[in-house]
Every structure is written in C-alpha cells, then in structure tokens.
Image (spheres, coloured by chain):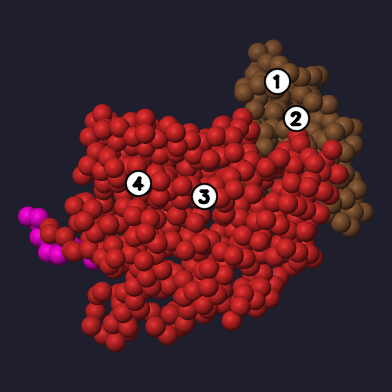
Chain colours: A red, B brown
C-alpha cells in the first residue's frame, strides 16, 4: 500500500471540520499533533471495557491492563530500537523525561564546578531543568552556539567539551528553526571523552526513523502528544547501565521493592523510575499511535515530508516580504518566519480567521529569538497529514495578511 | 457627553455591518492607525502592560475631574481595540468608569481577546484603566476631605 494522503486525512477526524466557516488548516503540529481514529478508539475502549489499575491486582481486568501496558513498552522499544524494555521508562512527556534525568543523573554524577553542555537552540524544557540542576549542584551551564543559518557551530564543540563536562543535552531537531542537528557527530565526539549525551527527540520522532542504538545516544526523550498519541504521556529511553546506577527521582507506589520505616529498597528497571499509578492509558494510546505510524510507514512519511518541505520552502521564498529564520538544508517540516515589520500577533490573528492555525511568539525558545534580535516568529509546522493545497492556502493567507497590514 | 452605554451600543452597531472577520479586522487596523501613538516618555517599562506576545502602554491624567487616557500597542489590531477602549473611557469621571460594565467587546465578537489566557495585555489594560479611575477617585475624595 502506497502513501495515500486522502486516506490518511480520513484517519484524523479533527481535520474534517471547519473553523469560522472555512476548512481547518492545521499547521501547529510542532505544538501538538492530532490523533488518528485508532488512538481515539483505543482510549475509548479502555474506559468502556478494560480499565483497571496495573501491576496491582490479580483479577482479570488488572492482568489484562498490565499486559497491555507492558506490551506498549515493547512497542516503544521496538519503535526506537532500544536493546531492552528495561530501558523504556514511561513519563509525563519529554519535559518530564528531561527533568527526571536532570535530577537523577545530577544527584549521582554532578558536583560543584562540573559543567553541563546544551545548545543555543534548545527548547526551554531542555534548558531550565539543567539550570535548576546546576543551581542545586553548583555546576555551570555551557552553550554550543548556532550560526546564521541555524546550524550548530561544531567547530566550537571540542573547546566546549572539557574534562569537567558531565553530560551533553541536545535537541535532535529544533522546534523553532527546523534544523536537524548532526547528533551522531556530537555523540561521537562526546563519547571520545566518555561524556554521555541526552537527545531531545520531541520534534524528531514524528518525522523520521529513530534508532537509539545506531545513534548510540545515552538518553532519548519524546512526548506522546507530538507523535499522534494521547497527551500527558512520554518516554525516557536510557542505556540500561546508566539507569541502573541512577537513583529514583520520585518515590511512591510501584517503584519500591520492600518498604518499612527503617528503609526502603527499590524495584528493578524500568519500574524504579515509574512511581505512582502510571498513565497507562497514555502509554497504551501511544503504542496505538506508533502502530499506526508503522502501518503508514515511517520511511513513506519521511519521503512525503521531504516533498512537503521542498514545496513549502519554495512557496515561502517566493514571498518577497517574508524572511525565514532557520535555513538548514537538513530539516524537519517546521518553518519560522517574519513578514516585513508586521507584528506576529497581528499576523496570527488574521491567519486564524482564515482557518489557518499557526503558532506565533517565541515557541519556548527565547534564546533563539535573542540570537536574531527579534521578539518572536510566525511558525508553520507540518506533518504527514498536511497537503500541498494547504501550503497554497497558507501562502494566500500570508499574502492577504501582508496586504491588510502594510 | 454621550452616555457610556450609548457609545458601547454604537460600537456594536458599527461592527454589525461587517459580515466577514477580515472586514472587522480591517476596521480595527484603521482605528489602530488613526490612534496617535503614546508620547515617547510614556512608552517605557513604567507604563508597559506586558502581554507575552504583544505590548500595551497606558497612561492616564485627571483633567477637570475627567480621565484622559493615552495608550498604545506594538500590534496594530490590538491597538485598534485599544483605540475603542480609549474612545469609550476618555473624558469620563472616575465614577462613570467604575460604575459601568464593559459589554461592547463581547458584542463585537472580540471576547476571546480579553480572556485571561490571551497574552496580548488587553485584559490587564482594562483592569489598569479601572485602577487609574479608582486611584484618582480616592485622590479626589482625599482632597475634598481636606477642604
């Protein structure tokens, strides 16, 4: 079965609607993605027929639910090609995953005077947890800068990686510039110095195949809601040897082995990092989303999106008053731009009324905006259910916006 | 001076002729362009009402018992809404501002622009206008008590 865009769009009920009497053109997928019918049905069926707390009881429903939850873990493992299900931790999302590592890894491995290396294009979620950790530990945050095209300045990497660096945390793909970073190169150079690397895959997993063993990253994080799954769920992948050494970051049910007032022993991986009743419906819904992506074909999705990127770029570049921020050739289907002196908020309001959903503002990457000396951009972020016709409508909308505001 | 609610009613009627949203926005853009910008001395952080995405500046004086507002925004559609608020609130006594309910924003379908989750500074601006009215009312009262 080839890539059939019409069929795919039918799989996403939310796309069928009109807003302000115009067909919805949803280009805010960087913020969150929509859910295929099969994910919605999965959640619905759980609550209608299957719901039960997991890992708790021996009754029928609980056993069924537990086995669905654990098979969701296997689905995630195979989707990113992790070595073992013990390396797959379900969290509340990419942010939750990074916070978990920043705390737990920090407790074990970071001391006063150490350094953490991130990049200038990180989402606030991959900045603030490390800043908080640095504050706790008396460590220092170092930053890999990017150039005018929005590409990492790798010539500075060797200088920034020092014997004090404890971890590198880097986005796989930028949510505001669209750049896909040369993560394998960064990992290789960090590993030469035995420094582990965390990759923020929140903007990458929905666009192309990710193989954590091939990348050889030490941690990989992503959110379910950005890859067509339910919100409030996410994944932390970590190499087993590292996770074994790291202390739990939250205490509660499920993560324990034996509890007494004298002391507690912890459960084994992955449960050690899953305190409390986990978001099992989220995890199972995520697995349904990943199965759906596989049924469409992640390679087909990647190929289609490359066409979409080429088309969108060409069309946007055809607008004289439009300037794109982030011009890397290796990119995801995310475009940040400004229209002459037009305020992004005005543009966003007008596009909205034409049924076009884009994001305006800093996209949680204020340092990226500071880099360019701007206060924000308009961002169109596309996924495989978007079409060339929608890009045409966006371009028409932009032209109308320019006409109205200049 | 036209009645506070009459002006609101007028604004609602003015907008009712627009069938398309873009026409409404075009009108707001016109209003925004016509509103003189705030003097540079007030376009400072002291008078800034910071929304996350657009900025609004507001300053008020009391002249002969009536409030004179000067306001501005860096986003033109927001500035258009600011112009409507200034038109309504200008030359009012503090009591008029405090006693009357704002309904025109709802009436012209711009309510979402004044919701607390909208980060354009407009809701904070309306609150600030009322705060100015309250402060000047208290000041007047104090002056009267001293007489």
Q: Chain of mark 3?
A: A
User: What's the distance in space between the residues labelled 4 and 2, CA to CA?
Assistant: 52 Å
User: Which tag is nearer the camera, tag 1 or tag 3?
Assistant: 3
Quadrant position of the C terminus of chain A in the picture = top right
Task: Name the residue at 29% across, 66% down.
Answer: A83
Q: Position of residue A199 (x, y in %)?
A: 40, 50
User: What's the distance in space between the residues labelled 1 and 3, CA to CA?
Assistant: 44 Å
**Which structural element holds mark 4?**
helix
Marks 2 and 1: CB-CB under 8 Å? yes
Judge left or right: residue B27 versus residue A203.
right
How busy is the neighbourhood of tag 4: few (under 14 within 10 Å), some, or many (20 plus)? Answer: some
The residue singled out by tag 3 in the image is A180
The residue singled out by tag 1 in the image is B42
Q: Name which of mark 2 and mark 1 comes first in the sequence.
A: 1
User: What's the distance in space between the residues labelled 2 and 1, CA to CA?
Assistant: 9 Å
Q: Chain of mark 2?
A: B
Q: Is residue A100 above or below residue B145?
A: below
Please provide the residue range marked out in magenta: A253-263
Marks 4 and 2: CB-CB under 8 Å? no
């Amino acid at each position: 079965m080839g890539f059939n865009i019409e069929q795919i769009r039918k799989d996403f009920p939310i796309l069928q609607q009109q807003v302000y009497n115009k067909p919805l053109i949803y280009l805010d997928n960087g913020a969150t993605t929509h859910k295929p019918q099969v994910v919605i049905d999965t959640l619905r069926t759980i609550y209608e027929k299957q719901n039960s707390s997991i890992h708790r009881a021996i009754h029928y429903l609980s056993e069924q639910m537990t086995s669905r939850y654990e098979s969701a873990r296997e689905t995630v493992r195979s989707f990113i090609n992790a070595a073992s299900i013990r390396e797959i931790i379900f969290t509340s999302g990419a942010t939750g995953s990074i916070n978990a590592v920043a705390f737990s890894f920090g407790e074990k491995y970071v001391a006063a005077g150490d350094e953490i290396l991130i990049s200038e294009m990180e989402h606030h979620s991959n900045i603030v947890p490390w800043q908080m950790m640095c504050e706790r530990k008396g460590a220092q945050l170092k930053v890999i800068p990017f150039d005018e095209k929005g590409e990492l300045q790798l010539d500075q990497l060797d200088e920034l990686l020092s014997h004090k660096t404890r971890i590198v945390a880097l986005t796989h793909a930028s949510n505001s510039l669209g750049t896909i970073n040369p993560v394998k190169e960064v990992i290789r150079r960090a590993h030469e110095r035995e420094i582990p690397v965390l990759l923020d895959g929140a903007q990458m997993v929905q666009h192309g195949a990710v193989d954590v063993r091939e990348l050889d990253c030490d941690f990989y994080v992503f959110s379910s809601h950005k890859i067509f799954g339910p919100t409030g769920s996410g994944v932390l992948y970590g190499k087993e040897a590292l996770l074994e050494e790291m202390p739990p970051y939250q205490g509660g049910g499920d993560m324990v082995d034996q509890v007494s007032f004298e002391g507690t022993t912890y459960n084994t991986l992955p449960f050690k990092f899953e305190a409390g009743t986990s978001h099992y419906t989220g995890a199972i819904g995520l697995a349904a989303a990943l199965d759906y992506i596989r049924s469409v074909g992640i390679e087909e999705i990647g190929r289609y999106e490359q066409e979409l990127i080429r088309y969108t770029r060409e069309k946007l570049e055809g607008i004289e008053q439009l300037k794109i921020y982030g011009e890397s050739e290796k990119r995801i289907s995310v475009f940040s731009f400004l229209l002459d002196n037009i305020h992004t908020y005005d543009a966003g309001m007008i596009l909205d009324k034409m049924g076009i959903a884009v994001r305006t503002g800093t996209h949680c990457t204020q340092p990226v905006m500071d880099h360019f000396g701007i206060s924000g951009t308009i961002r169109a972020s596309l996924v495989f259910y978007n079409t060339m016709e929608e890009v045409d409508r966006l371009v028409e909308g932009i032209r109308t916006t320019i006409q109205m505001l200049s | 001076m036209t009645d506070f609610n009459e002006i609101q009613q007028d604004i609602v009627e003015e907008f009712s002729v627009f069938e398309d949203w873009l026409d409404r926005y075009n009108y707001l853009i016109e209003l925004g362009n016509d509103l003189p910008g705030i003097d540079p001395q007030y376009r400072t952080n002291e008078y800034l009402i910071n929304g996350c995405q657009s900025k609004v500046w507001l300053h008020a004086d009391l002249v002969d018992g009536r409030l004179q507002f000067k306001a501005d925004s860096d986003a033109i559609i927001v500035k258009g809404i600011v112009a409507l608020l200034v038109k309504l609130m200008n030359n009012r006594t503090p009591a008029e501002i405090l006693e009357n309910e704002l309904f025109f924003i709802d009436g012209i379908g711009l309510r979402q622009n004044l919701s607390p989750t909208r980060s354009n500074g407009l809701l904070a601006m309306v609150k600030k206008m009322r705060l100015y009215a309250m402060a000047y009312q208290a000041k007047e009262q104090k002056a009267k008590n001293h007489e």
